[in-house]
Amino acid sequence: MIKLENVTKNYKSADSAALRNANIDIGKGEFVFLVGPSGSGKSTFIRLLNKEENPSEGRIFVAGKDIGQLNSWKVPYLRRNIGCIFQDFKLLEKKTVAENVAFALEVIGRPKSVITKQVPAILELVGLADKVDSFPNQLSGGEQQRVSIARAFVNRPLILLADEPTGNLDPATSVGIMRLLDRINRTGTTVVMATHDRGIVDTMRRRVIELDQGTIVRDQAQGVYE
Amino acid sequence: MALKVSYMLRETGINLARRLTLTIAAILTISISLGLFGSSLLARDSVANATSRWEGGIEFVVWMNPTVDADQDAAIRRVLDESAAIESWTFVNQEEAYQEFLELFDESPELRDSVVPEDLPPSFRVVPTTKDADVVEEIGSQFETLPGVRDVVFAGEVIRSIQEQANKISNFLLWVSIALLIASALLILNTIVVAISARRQEIEVMKLVGASNWFIRLPFMLEGLIHGLVGAGIAVGLMYSLKRFVIDGFTKSQGLRLLEGLKVTNDELIYRGLWVLGIGIAVGILGSAFAVSTKLDV
Ligand SMILES: Nc1ncnc2c1ncn2[C@@H]1O[C@H](COP(=O)(O)OP(=O)(O)OP(=O)(O)O)[C@@H](O)[C@H]1O
Ligand SMILES: [Mg+2]
């Protein structure tokens, strides 16, 4: 599903590589944790996968396609197959929960009939059926993250990228979010999640890729944080 | 698709309404600049219409009798060719004179129907080597006595100064309007830049979920297009008023005989109006395209 071949990323302003000669193969339906100290290149790894950044060297394949070869007008179609969630949720404050989720379908041109059917269904799935008309600032952090998961998943992407999705949440709330991600993973969606949360990594026992100063130092099936 | 169209219109409408004062400023500037631009073109047209016989250095016209015969005609041509004081001349036959007449009176069907080409005098339009009024008078008057000649009409200083002044004024208006047009393009650009930065978060989310590049750009492009289009529409209204209430007044006036030849035809108004609309659309699209390409990064 995801394949990196000798990928190196040098940011223009930085003197050392954010990612160095990475080779990784992630299969369909896998759940992968990216761990490593701050600045080790986890977010860079994730941004390379949805082509927010381009590698300085090497090739990246997503769903069998070399994404370095994509025309800029085709990038949006790549992103429709990739859901993204973040530590800061990136919800639109002026839209309700339902509108935030509907927005993701609306702007890729889905017909109204599809939107009115899928939005309540996905909100039910993430456990927010009673909050559809609330605004983001009326929700707890955990609830906001569920909205952003609903938005990322409503289009049934092949891949879900999560950059520290529990970074702003307390441990109990984090467990709820991880259950949700686990459920999504079980539908066959490949999940790649960057995290600093030792507890989560150690209890889930999934594949762990550890980065250190841009280099992959460990790739372990059913791994632990350290 | 229906959803997309309604989405585009709704988003564009929201953009326009949220920054109403900027929108009004942009539209007013573009309508004033295009109104001036269009007016200067119309002024040019009307003076050209009034003085069309006197363009290209023509200083006098030898009007022949409609009944002139071939010998008389040949005699005039010989004098014109042999005179060292005459640089060039053109002959306007009865059919051409009739066409000119039709253009001048295209809004008076009664008059047009009462005249046939045979009624109209052929003429020689003469460009002398000098513009000195006295010398021109002397050259021209020698034709008055030749057989077949009805009379000789001189351009005179009045026509010349009208042409000169009109050109000066319309050139001035043209430059002012071009400066204002640049100002309106910049204003549109800034309005769109503000619109884009106000929607930063929405744009970020749209990119993340895979909205196509044009889907993101289009509401902003439409906003600029609407500025240009509405501004140009107002400008065309101004031009219509100028024709209807000012120039047409001159055309019909009895008191201001000097200005009676000033006129703009409906065709000219439509033609210049289309110019103005085209420029308005171009300015709107250019301003917003520049904002979108530099600030949107999609
Ligand atoms: N846009 C950028 N421009 C320049 N340098 C950058 C940029 N983004 C990241 N970097 C640098 O690249 C390196 C890797 O950063 P990255 O954000 O991928 O780390 P991270 O593992 O996600 O860190 P954290 O755990 O703090 O989120 C860092 O040295 C960082 O300073
Ligand atoms: Mg990071």
Image: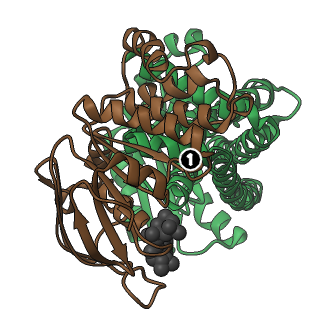
Chain colours: A brown, B green
Residue A29 shown left or right of residue B123 in the figure: left
**B50 relative position to A198: left or right:** right
Disc 1 residue type (three-letter): Arg
Q: Quick check: can you spot residue B94?
A: no
**The quarter of the displayed image where residue B223 is located:** top right
- The percent position of residue B213, horizontal first and vertical second, equals 39, 45
| Number of numbered discs | 1
Secondary structure beneath dot 1 equals helix
Please tell me which residue is depicted at 72% across the width and 48% down the height of the picture.
B33
Q: Is residue A146 left or right of residue B138?
A: left
- The spot of residue B143 in percent (x, y) is 54, 55
- Closer to the camera in the image, A48 or A212: A212
Which residue, given by chain and number where applicable, does mark 1 sit on? Answer: B53
Spot occupied by residue A206 in the image (x, y as percentages of width and height): 28, 50
Q: Residue furthest left?
A: A64
Mark 1 vs ligand 1: CB below 8 Å: no
